[in-house]
Image (cartoon, rainbow, N blue to C red):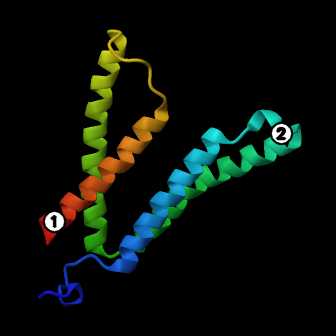
Amino acid sequence: MSDLSENPRAPSVPYLAKVMASLCLLACWALISLWLPFSGLAGYERAAVLALLAVTGVGLPLWAWWRYRRMDELQQRLHERASTFALGTSLGALAVLELLQRQGLMPELTPLPAAVAIVGLWGLGLALAHNKVS
């Protein structure tokens, strides 16, 4: 079984490409929303850009939910395990970070590092769940 196509439990390339494209889209959306120079825009232009960012911010989770419903049962279980791992680990890490911030041992962080950590932990959880199944 040297070829990945012979292994029925190997992740498919189109599936991994979809996951990576979704993560890249999410990262691009976050970076655009953070570094877009809103101060130089006129009132209606600023409102249009903010509305577009808000609609995509609401639309991305709805799209993910729609895609999740169309997955087969094994992929749903893998994503459930990955999400559970990411949620528990990130909440524990955020609690420790909050404790350190309250004691003045760490500077205050923005929500973006927490979001990046959650996405990274979700990816790690997905890899761990896939290894456990295969």
Q: Can you say whether 51 is above or below 5 in the image?
A: above
Residue, far front: 2
The residue labelled by disc 1 is 131
For the residue marked with disc 2, what is the amino acid?
A: Leu
**Residue 84 spot, x, y in % from top left:** 27, 49
What residue is shown at x 66% (from left), y 52% (from top)? 55
What residue is shown at x 41% (from left), y 72% (from top)? 17
| Quadrant hosting residue 5 | bottom left
**Pick the front one: 67 or 10:** 10
Q: Can you say whether 20 is above or below 53 in the image?
A: below
For the residue marked with disc 1, what is the amino acid?
A: Asn
What residue is shown at x 34% (from left), y 21% (from top)? 98
Residue 51 - label: none
Task: Name the secondary structure under disc 2.
Answer: loop
Task: Name the secondary structure under disc 1.
Answer: helix
Q: Residues within 10 Å of mark 2 (few under 14, many from 20)?
A: few
Labels 1 and 2 touching (C-beta < 8 A):
no
Residue, far top: 103
**Residue 62 spot, x, y in % from top left:** 53, 59
**Residue 133 spot, x, y in % from top left:** 15, 69
Q: Can you say whether 79 is above or below 18 in the image?
A: above
Quadrant of image for the N terminus: bottom left
Residue 36 lies left or right of residue 116; in this view the side is right
Residue 55 lies left or right of residue 12; in this view the side is right
Total marks in image: 2
The residue labelled by disc 2 is 41
| Quadrant hosting residue 80 | bottom left
What residue is shown at x 23% (from left), y 61% (from top)? 127
Residue 1 lies left or right of residue 33; in this view the side is left
Quadrant of image for the C terminus: bottom left
Q: Can you say whether 81 is above or below 90 in the image?
A: below
**Residue 77 spot, x, y in % from top left:** 25, 65
